[in-house]
Amino acid sequence: MNTLLLLLPALGWGLLPPVVAKLGGKPANEILGTALGTLIASVGVFIVLKPQITVQSFLLAAFAGAFWIVGQLGQYHGYQKIGVSQTMPISTGLQLVGTSLIGVFIFGEWSTGIEKAFGALGVLMLIIGIWLTSITDHKSQEEANHQRINTIVMLVLTSAGYWVYNSIPRGLSDSGLAIFLPESIGMVIAVLVYLAVTKQGIVFKEKTSWLNIIGGLVFSFAAVTYILSVKANGVNTAFVVSQVSVVISTLLGMVWMHETKSRRELSYTLLGLLMIVAGAVITTLF
């Protein structure tokens, strides 16, 4: 059972990008559906388990959920601009780099010299992995190359949302399934603000938005099984195995979404994925 719990989060998070991309629509449709699906699932979890949570933890968890929307919007824009198979390795690598550095400078992780050395090595491997997966053969197409660079810059900026989302729970007295509902409430509020500011309220009337609730349910499946895996297998083991999701999503992007790569691009992508997973292992274990 514990082994199954290890694999389920990776499967869920690996399926989310191609599922959302396949459902289609604009990023506004995708983010609205994902947030609503997560809220539905979290309400169900809350009704069944009735977890206890303090007001302070509730507010901070909602704040974290709002920042998750920032990161996820970046990913959804990335799917449309450069595809799932290129967005996910870059986005995942950036998440791991940022979260690791926050752990060092804010939470005092990697306290010994050996931990700092291996941690720095892990971050370097993540950066190299990101660079390898971003390599393309289409350098002669100036417009396409310009769009790819702009998308990578956008992913760097929006990944800050993931860094906040991943970091806040470390400082909470309440954790796990107790903060799932407030996080989802924060997600929905952030989406409503985003839609109001960008004047995209029309998405409420579009069928694609409601279809993307499936994406939210897939995300919730991964999130809940990850929390259970952490309890059963420990944080380090659960986190490292969950990073296999980037391999699943990238390969599904190429196979299911038919995102073509040359032999050279495929070789660099696979090598980059290996570096990202290895970097995740090193930064987590040390």
Image: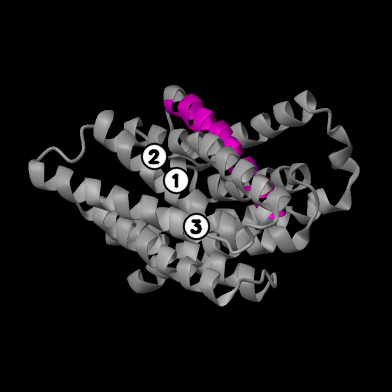
Q: Nearer the viewer, residue 143 or 252?
A: 143
Report which residue position mark 1 lands on: 94
Q: Main secondary structure of the magenta part?
A: helix
- Total tally of numbered discs in the picture: 3
Disc 3 + disc 1, Cβ < 8 Å: no
Say the numbered circle drawn on residue 145: none
Range of residues picked out in magenta: 57-80
**Tag 1: residue type?**
Leu
Which quadrant of the rendered structure holds the N terminus? bottom left
Give residue 70's position: percent from left, percent from top: 59, 35
Report which residue position mark 3 lands on: 89
Give residue 143's position: percent from left, percent from top: 72, 49
Give residue 54's position: percent from left, percent from top: 42, 27
Categorize mark 3 by other alpha carbons within 10 Å: few (<14), some (14-19), many (20+): many
The Cα–Cα distance between marks 1 and 2, rounded to whole angstroms, is 6 Å
Q: Is residue 216 left or right of residue 71?
A: right
Q: Is residue 126 left or right of residue 217?
A: left
Q: Nearer the viewer, residue 130 or 237?
A: 130
Disc 1 + disc 2, Cβ < 8 Å: yes
Categorize mark 1 by other alpha carbons within 10 Å: few (<14), some (14-19), many (20+): many
Along the polypeptide, which appears first: circle 3 or circle 1?
3
Q: Nearer the viewer, residue 243 or 122?
A: 122
Residue 64: in magenta span? yes
Q: Secondary structure at mark 1?
A: helix
In the displayed structure, 219 sits above or below 60; it is below
The Cα–Cα distance between marks 3 and 2, rounded to whole angstroms, is 14 Å
Categorize mark 2 by other alpha carbons within 10 Å: few (<14), some (14-19), many (20+): many
**Tag 2: residue type?**
Gly
Q: Is residue 43 visible?
A: no
The Cα–Cα distance between marks 3 and 1, rounded to whole angstroms, is 8 Å
Residue 22 image-quadrant placement: bottom right
Report which residue position mark 2 lands on: 98
